[in-house]
Image (tube, helix red, strand yellow):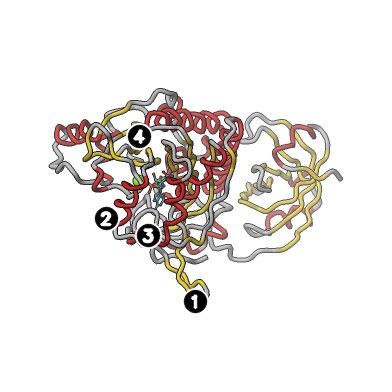
């Protein structure tokens, strides 16, 4: 019997096929058994009519427990009323392993229980759809940069120094020395863009975030492009083109998953360049007008970002934050030394910051001073300073957090659902 996947059933209409999968759900009407099978590519309903079957097979159908692994052979019918468009009339069933007391039942469960059972929870429809969208996001990122002639340059995970501030570093023993899990591959991409012109890295990054919010993980994935001979304007243009590309690819290629998530796509369809751009100063005015008592010089919190992005129906780019709240590597605005040439992109619908980036300091002496002012150890940055000694040029880039991007696309209530096995404060299991 031809084994097939559920998403290829169209090739087997009016023929027999075998699906190898798991029992997702079932119901019975006394005369009929309805089994919902899943195999990772989709869900199909398999039916058995009592009058058509021998008693043994009918009984077996009613007795198989949820999430048992089964092989079902049946004849395939096109049926517009079925969710996937096809239905299977059961001819034969082989139980591979009978599962008992599967913990995730069709009733609702609390978040903590589901996270503890994450290894099983990813089988559930919405979690499955979310991770399929994550897969499309990742593939679209790789395609985007490949098509634009960026070279993928992997950044290391063990690093000798902080990139994004010393308060969120994970320290590890490195033989007789100390090392830190990377917070960002950016500094290495600055080296890479001087070798390849346009480079990007894409990998896990780590932050010892003590915050328990719906937007923070301690391990998350970031994609970081960096371009030589580029300035702040160039990265603003790249970031809006890039984000638009990802959104439109997901809308085109993951329609079924978006439907499973019941995601309203009106705002997403609208995501095309150009995006609105506002300066930090203008954003602060919006906060004040919106009734928030915000002091110039501070960083935006989640409610501030929600208010600012609420003024727009597309992601908004906020540029030129106060230099004092930004990382050591940022270049100051030549027109106002108190400001940094940096950008944050805020997604609408209360999602907030999805991108952070900007233009880098390219002058050796100024950079040395910034490293000292931030209390960072210069011995760890010798190699980084070399980049300003040997052919320094203006350069710029940004980082997009994958989980926040997927969370926005899926309309998830928490980023923890957008990564297969989330790592958070107080959670490192499973
Ligand atoms: O704004 P961040 O800290 O920027 C950097 O790390 C730069 N070095 C990137 C660069 O210019 N190459 O982080 C970038 C993005 C954020 O906008 C957010 O989307 C995501 O990374 N992010 C997190 N996502 C989940 N959990 C966390 N704890 C995150 N911290 C940052
Ligand atoms: Mg940031």
> Mark 4 or mark 1: which is in front?
1
Q: Is residue 256 visible?
A: no
Q: Cα distance, mark 2 to mark 1?
A: 28 Å
Tag on residue 176? 1
Q: Is residue 190 visible?
A: yes
How would you rate the neighbour count of disc 1 (Cα within 10 Å): few for under 14, some for 14-19, many for 20 or more? Answer: few
Q: Cα distance, mark 3 to mark 4?
A: 39 Å
How would you rate the neighbour count of disc 3 (Cα within 10 Å): few for under 14, some for 14-19, many for 20 or more? Answer: some
Q: Cα distance, mark 4 to mark 2?
A: 35 Å
- Residue tagged 4: 348
60 left or right, relative to 120: right
Q: Secondary structure at mark 3?
A: helix
- Residue tagged 3: 378
- Which residue is drawn at the image coordinates 44% and 32% (left, top)? 230
> Does ligand 1 reach within 8 Å of label 4's beta carbon?
no
Badge 4 or badge 1: first in the primary sequence: 1
Tag on residue 23? none
Badge 3 or badge 1: first in the primary sequence: 1
- Which residue is drawn at the image coordinates 50% and 71% (left, top)? 174
Q: Secondary structure at mark 4?
A: loop
Measuring from the top left, give residue 351's x and y in whole percent.
36, 41
Q: Residue furthest right?
A: 1
**Image marks 4 and 2: residues in contact by CB distance under 8 Å:** no
Vertical side of 99 occupied by 329: above or below: above
Measuring from the top left, give residue 135's x and y in whole percent.
58, 43
- Which residue is drawn at the image coordinates 44% and 24% (left, top)? 272
How would you rate the neighbour count of disc 4 (Cα within 10 Å): few for under 14, some for 14-19, many for 20 or more? Answer: many
Tag on residue 373? 2
Q: Secondary structure at mark 1?
A: loop
């Amino acid at each position: 019997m031809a084994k097939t996947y559920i998403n290829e059933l169209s090739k087997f209409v009016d023929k027999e096929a075998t699906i190898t999968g798991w029992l997702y759900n079932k119901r019975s009407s006394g005369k009929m058994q309805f089994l919902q099978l899943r195999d990772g590519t989709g869900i199909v309903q398999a039916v058995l009519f009592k009058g058509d079957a021998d008693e043994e097979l009918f009984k077996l159908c009613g007795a198989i427990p949820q999430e048992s692994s089964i092989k079902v052979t049946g004849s395939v019918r096109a049926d517009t009323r079925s969710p996937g468009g096809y239905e299977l009339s059961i001819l034969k069933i082989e139980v591979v392993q009978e599962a008992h007391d599967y913990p995730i039942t069709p009733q609702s469960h609390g978040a903590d229980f589901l996270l503890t059972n994450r290894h099983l929870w990813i089988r559930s429809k919405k979690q499955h759809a979310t991770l399929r969208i994550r897969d499309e996001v990742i593939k679209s990122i790789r395609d985007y940069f490949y098509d634009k002639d960026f070279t993928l340059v992997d950044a290391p995970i063990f690093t000798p120094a902080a990139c994004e501030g010393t308060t969120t570093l994970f320290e590890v023993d490195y033989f007789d020395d100390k090392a830190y899990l990377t917070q960002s591959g950016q500094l290495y991409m600055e080296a890479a863009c001087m070798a390849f012109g346009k480079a990007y890295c894409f990998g896990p990054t780590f932050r010892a975030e003590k915050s328990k919010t719906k937007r923070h993980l301690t391990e998350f994935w970031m994609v970081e492009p960096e371009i030589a001979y580029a300035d702040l304007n160039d990265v603003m243009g790249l970031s809006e083109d890039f984000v638009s590309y990802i959104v439109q690819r997901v809308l085109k290629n993951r329609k079924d998953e978006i439907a499973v998530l019941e995601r309203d796509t009106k705002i997403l369809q609208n995501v095309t360049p150009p995006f609105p751009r506002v300066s930090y100063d203008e954003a602060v005015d919006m906060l004040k007008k919106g009734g928030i008592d915000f002091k110039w010089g501070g960083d935006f919190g989640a409610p501030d970002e929600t208010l600012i992005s609420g003024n727009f129906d597309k992601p908004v780019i906020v540029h030129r934050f106060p230099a004092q709240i930004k990382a050591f590597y940022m270049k100051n605005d030549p027109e106002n030394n108190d400001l940094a040439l940096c950008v944050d992109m805020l997604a609408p619908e209360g999602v907030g910051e999805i991108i952070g980036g900007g233009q880098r300091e390219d002058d050796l002496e100024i950079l040395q001073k910034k490293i000292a002012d931030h209390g960072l150890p210069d011995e760890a940055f010798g190699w980084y300073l070399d980049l300003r000694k040997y052919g320094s040029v203006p350069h710029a880039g940004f980082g997009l957090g994958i989980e926040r991007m997927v969370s926005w696309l899926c309309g998830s209530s928490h980023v923890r659902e957008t990564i297969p096995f989330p790592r958070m404060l107080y959670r490192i299991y499973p």
